[in-house]
Amino acid sequence: EVQLVQSGAEVKKSGESLKISCKGSGYTFSDYWIAWVRQMPGKGLEWMGVIYPGDSDTRYSPSFQGQVTISADKSINTAYLQWSSLKASDTAIYFCARLDGDEGDGFYFDPWGQGTLVTVSS
Amino acid sequence: SYVLTQPPSVSVAPGQTARITCGGNNIVSKSVHWYQQKPGQAPVLVVYDDTDRPSGIPERISGSNSGNTATLTISRVEAGDEADYYCQVWDSSSDHYVFGIGTKVTVL
């Protein structure tokens, strides 16, 4: 079974750093892009960026470029999302998801991790 | 950048049909994917490539795409279908992934 398991909920203060993780299993982790998606409280889904663990090629949404860093360690089948200085507005649930599909038919997100709740207090 | 437009909410009685639209400029030229998200849970893919269903998704859920509108149709609606539904495309010109704002389906 293809599965993504994310790290647990975090409570941080403004200005602190944070790195959350997403571990894949049940497939060849290096061969599929991993995406990160933000969901702010009561709001919709926002694509943040993607990484190809095979060579660490990374693409960011313009809205998140410079705000977060996406990385991966293919040796342990894990992708990461990190912040160097959190803000209260970073409070949200963060999902990772595997990208499937192709350039001909487009890419979709399947499956998703269970989500990591990040709460940042000011 | 490419924009997807969804109605914020749709209400439907049990046993009836819910239709959730997703508008975009010449959206027929793109593959549209749909996700169901129930409260407190991660999204789940219910339709991909306009019309295909992943294994485990009931045949009552179907998708279509024509002109400037893609549609997710839920037939014989049940209480368990109550959720938020999001459409999504990959915009090849920008290499960006775009979500609609989501539609909350309420079963009356």
Image: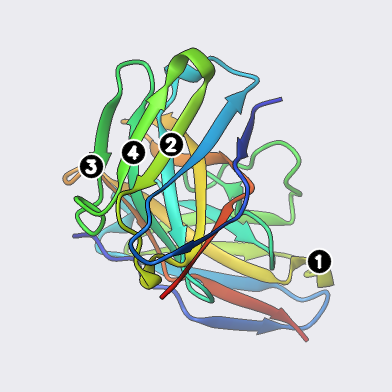
Residue at the image position 55 percent from the left and 39 percent from the top:
A110
- C-alpha separation, residue under disc 1 versus residue under disc 4: 35 Å
Q: Give me the chain letter of mark 3.
A: B
Q: Secondary structure at mark 3?
A: loop
Q: Secondary structure at mark 4?
A: strand
Q: Disc 4 designates what residue? A: A70
| Image-based side of B27 in relation to B81, left or right | left
Where residue A21 sits in the image (x, y, percent)?
A: 51, 38
Q: Disc 1 designates what residue? A: B80
Q: Between tags 1 and 4, which lies in front?
A: 4
* Tags 4 and 2 touching, CB below 8 Å: yes
Q: Residues within 10 Å of mark 1 (few under 14, many from 20)?
A: few
Where residue A32 sits in the image (x, y, percent)?
A: 44, 24
Residue at the image position 53 percent from the left and 14 percent from the top:
A28
Q: Secondary structure at mark 2?
A: strand
Q: Disc 3 designates what residue? A: B95
Q: Is residue A59 visible?
A: yes
**Res B36 → quadrant:** bottom right
| Image-based side of B76 in relation to B10, left or right | right
Q: Between tags 4 and 3, which lies in front?
A: 4
| Image-based side of A41 in relation to A4, left or right | left
- Residue type, mark 2 in image: Tyr
- C-alpha separation, residue under disc 1 versus residue under disc 2: 33 Å
Where residue A24 sits in the image (x, y, percent)?
A: 58, 27
- Residue type, mark 1 in image: Gly
Q: Earlier in the sequence, mark 1 or mark 3?
A: 1
Residue at the image position 31 percent from the left and 31 percent from the top:
A103
- C-alpha separation, residue under disc 4 versus residue under disc 2: 6 Å
